[in-house]
Amino acid sequence: MRPFRFGVALVTPGSRAGWVAKCRQAEDLGYDVVGVVDHLGRVAPVPALLLAAEATERVKLNTYVLNASFHNPVLLARDLTGLDEFTGGRLEIGIGAGYVRAEFEAAGIEWGTPGQRFARLKRVVAEIERAYAGRPRPPLLLGGRGDRMLEFAAEHADTIAFTGTAPGAAEGRLALAGPAAVAERVDFVKRALGGRDTELNLMVHLVRITDDRQTALEEAHRLVPHLGADELGELPTVLIGSAEAAAEQLLRTRETLGISYFTVIEDDLTRLAPVIEKLR
């Protein structure tokens, strides 16, 4: 069984001092990975991770995840190999196909079909692998929801990331998937892996550490009305309860689904910290 790893995806732009402070805080709180997203209006991934490397000593640094369509594959491979070198080998590369159509349109990039976006992702992965031909490359994380993407990840990725989401009511929006749907995607990947040992990652979308679990579940239900409070309490993508209960939930998730690497968004940076401490 793999040891736990915990990551945080930092999203909020700000000053240099503020960014450095957040990265150091994540390392001090026991996180293993500091990551950045790739969305318009957020931090630019490459310079943000370079500064994160200067600010920290231990944590891995990852792109969680780069939108393949936003980048020229050859130039991106060049930038990532340079980032790998300048961060002292702490880089982990995460790639996705993109899902927010409005961002494509704002950037003047063709949205295309799912097949076209998937083809762009494959080209990016091929260029990264070509850039590292004959030498070890950084660990590659690939994630998504669809069969085609997960099958490709099972063949190429060192880490497979599950979003724990389903398409939302509005285009470009995602909704939390129910417990059965999450388990089905994990089972699909395990079949595709055919016994290959690959790290599994899950995005945890909500963390609330409290002794009043029922009230917190009811409040979460108002934010996620398509799932009942009881369903939310069963979701591996939601941690609500005491630090001890949340730690036990992560232990169960690792035992039942084989997921050992969990990532939270910046808003939950400090909330997950007492849970990490329980599991060290």
Image (cartoon, helix red, strand yellow):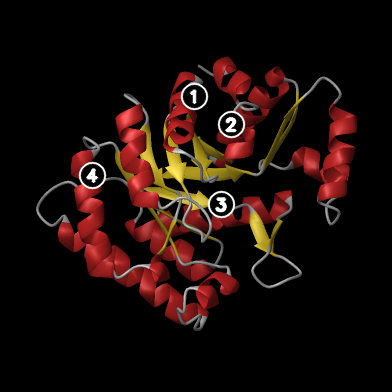
Q: CA distance from mark 2 to mark 3?
A: 25 Å
| 197 is higher (above) or lower (below) than 52 | below
Q: CB of mark 2 within 8 Å of CB of mark 1? A: yes
Q: Earlier in the sequence, mark 4 or mark 2?
A: 4
Q: To which residue does mark 1 refer? A: 25
Identify the residue shown where x is 51% and y is 61%.
40
Q: Amino acid at mark 2?
A: Leu
**Quadrant in which the N terminus appears:** top left
Label 1 residue SS: helix
Q: Earlier in the sequence, mark 1 or mark 4?
A: 1
Q: To which residue does mark 2 refer? A: 269
Q: Residues within 10 Å of mark 3 (few under 14, many from 20)?
A: many
Q: Position of residue 223 (x, y in %)?
A: 82, 49
Numbered disc in front, either 2 or 3: 2
Q: Which mark is residue 72?
A: none
Q: Amino acid at mark 1?
A: Gln
Label 3 residue SS: helix
Q: Residues within 10 Å of mark 2 (few under 14, many from 20)?
A: many
Label 2 residue SS: loop
Q: Earlier in the sequence, mark 1 or mark 3?
A: 1
Q: CB of mark 4 within 8 Å of CB of mark 3? A: no
Q: Position of residue 56 (x, y in %)?
A: 35, 26
Q: Is residue 213 left or right of residue 53?
A: right
Numbered disc in front, either 1 or 4: 1
Label 4 residue SS: helix
Question: Can residue 197 be seen from the camera position used here?
Answer: no
Q: To which residue does mark 4 refer? A: 84
Judge by depth and name the residue closer to the eye, 243 or 233: 243
Q: CB of mark 4 within 8 Å of CB of mark 2? A: no
Numbered disc in front, either 1 or 3: 1
Judge by depth and name the residue closer to the eye, 77 or 135: 77
Q: To which residue does mark 3 refer? A: 186
